[in-house]
Image (cartoon, rainbow, N blue to C red):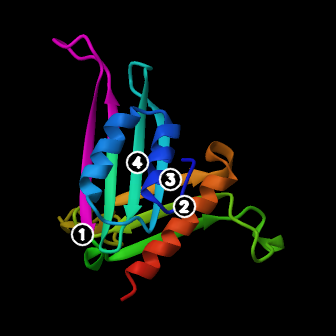
Amino acid sequence: MRETRVSVTGLREAIDRSGYYPALVAEAVESALGEESVIAFVVHHEATFDPRMEVLRHVTVLVLSPSRLLVCHTDEHPPEEGSPHAHASTTTEAVRLSSVRSVAVTRVVPDPGSYVPGVPPTEVMLTIGWGAISHIDLEPATCSEEACEADHGYTGAITADDLSLRVSEAADGPEAVARVLAFAKALSASTAS
């Protein structure tokens, strides 16, 4: 993640700087954006390791337009049986701002006892929910009687978690933390009405 200047040109430059199949990512984002203007954006590039100890890349591009939140994920996939070449998949989702149900920001601050207002957190987790994905966590229900062998059914929770993006000062730099906070602020303001 490198750039959040508010323009289509700045967005394209940030995608180019991520270095991750920039033509593919930019085409997907620009196609979803159409003629709309850009209010804010975040480009976040991360590497992951698959079980075969291969490094695979993933980029997330979030774009806030006047009417929508655009989410673009591009993943790298290793060669598979029958296909000797790696391939990438790109998914874009356009969410009406009126559909965004929650914008949650978790800030991690070291040594909170000596926290000074205005000092940025060292880590930020941005979670955005719009109702497309819900996770159900179930576990067997129990009672307080240790010898009870009755079936008490299940208990659990349903949580909406359509998108989670984590950045840290240590991994991504302090600028990345500030940019995600700025994006979250702009998105929260855009979904307030």
Q: Residue at x 42, y 32 (%)?
A: 57
Q: Amino acid at mark 3?
A: Gly
Nearer the viewer's eye, disc 3 or disc 4? 3
26 sits to left or right of 89: right
41 sits to left or right of 129: right
Q: Which residue is mark 1?
A: 131
Tell which circle, 2 or 3, labels the residue nearer the N-terminal end.
3
Q: Amino acid at mark 4?
A: Thr
Quadrant of image for the C terminus: bottom left
* Residue at mark 3 to residue at mark 4: CA–CA distance: 16 Å
Q: Residue at x 32, y 50 (%)?
A: 29
184 sits to left or right of 21: right
Give the image quarter of residue 25: top left
Q: Amino acid at mark 1?
A: Gly
* Residue at mark 3 to residue at mark 1: CA–CA distance: 30 Å
| Tag 2–tag 3 contact (CB < 8 Å) | no
| Tag 2–tag 1 contact (CB < 8 Å) | no
Give the image quarter of residue 131: bottom left
Q: Which residues are magenta?
A: 74-95
Nearer the observer, 101 or 193? 193
Q: Residue at x 50, y 53 (%)?
A: 10
Few, some or many residues within 10 Å of mark 1 (<14, 14–19, 20+):
some
Q: Which residue is mark 2?
A: 180
